[in-house]
Image (spheres, helix red, strand yellow):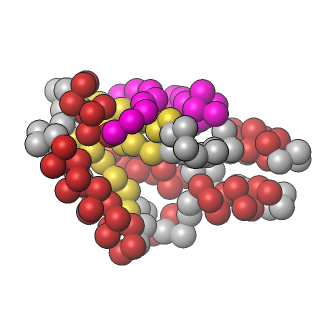
Amino acid sequence: MQTAVYPGSFDPCTNGHIDVIRRASKMFDKVVVAVLVNEKKNPLFSFEERVNMLKTATQDIPNIEICSFSGLLADFMKENGYGVIVKGLRAVSDYEYEFQMALTNRALYDKVETVFMPCSAEFMFLSSSIVKEIAKYNGELSGLVPETLIPLIKGRFGY
């Protein structure tokens, strides 16, 4: 059984993230969506909230598991016996950073491979940061995030 891990902060998850998850779920027997817990960052949503948002947004995808991790991705991969990382790419700048991370993960755990998945064209501009900026000013989030998450995201900003 081939399992892939799609790691990220998902603060909050966007339709771009969901697109990569759906597409990866067709390529692999199982996709573990791993939410990074990073004590150095100050996310808008707690890791529990991010996990719950992803569970809500992916409930119709049967071969998905949502979990959280902290520390190095390579250690998480090794501890769980996973061998494939899926990374979505929006632009060349993403590729440069993710290529460096892929080489680092492989240096730390030689049994891991990274698969790069270009995002769908309609999500090339989309990021969690953009979603938060739009939500901060009560802008329209339809089409950017799963509809079921809009009240939660807007509610965080008092709307």
Q: Is any part of residue 130 visible from this angle?
A: yes
Pick whichever, 77 or 84, lies toward us. Answer: 77
* Left or right position of 136 against 46: right
Residue 54 visible somewhere in the drawing: no
User: Which residue is found at the position 80% from the left and 57% from the top?
Assistant: 136
Q: Residue furthest left?
A: 110
Q: Is residue 97 or residue 29 the one in the foreground?
A: 97
Percent of width and height locating residue 103: 20, 56
Looking at the rendering, which quadrant does residue 57 occupy? top right
Instruction: Count the marks.
Output: 0
Residue at image point 64% right, 45% down: 42
Quadrant that contains the N terminus: top left
Residue closest to the far bottom? 92
- The question of residue 55 being in magenta is answered with yes
Residue 90, picture quadrant = bottom left
Farthest front residue in view:
40
Q: Image check: 76 left or right of 131?
A: left
Please state if 143 lies on the left or on the right of 26 as rendered.
Answer: right
Q: Position of residue 48 (x, y in %)?
A: 60, 27
Is 141 placed left or right of 155 in the picture? Answer: left
Q: Residue at x 35, y 65 (%)?
A: 97
Q: Which residues are magenta?
A: 46-72
- Residue plotted at (34% across, 53% down): 87
Does the magenta run of residues contain 111? no
Percent across and percent down for residue 129 are 62, 59
Q: Position of residue 28 (x, y in %)?
A: 24, 38
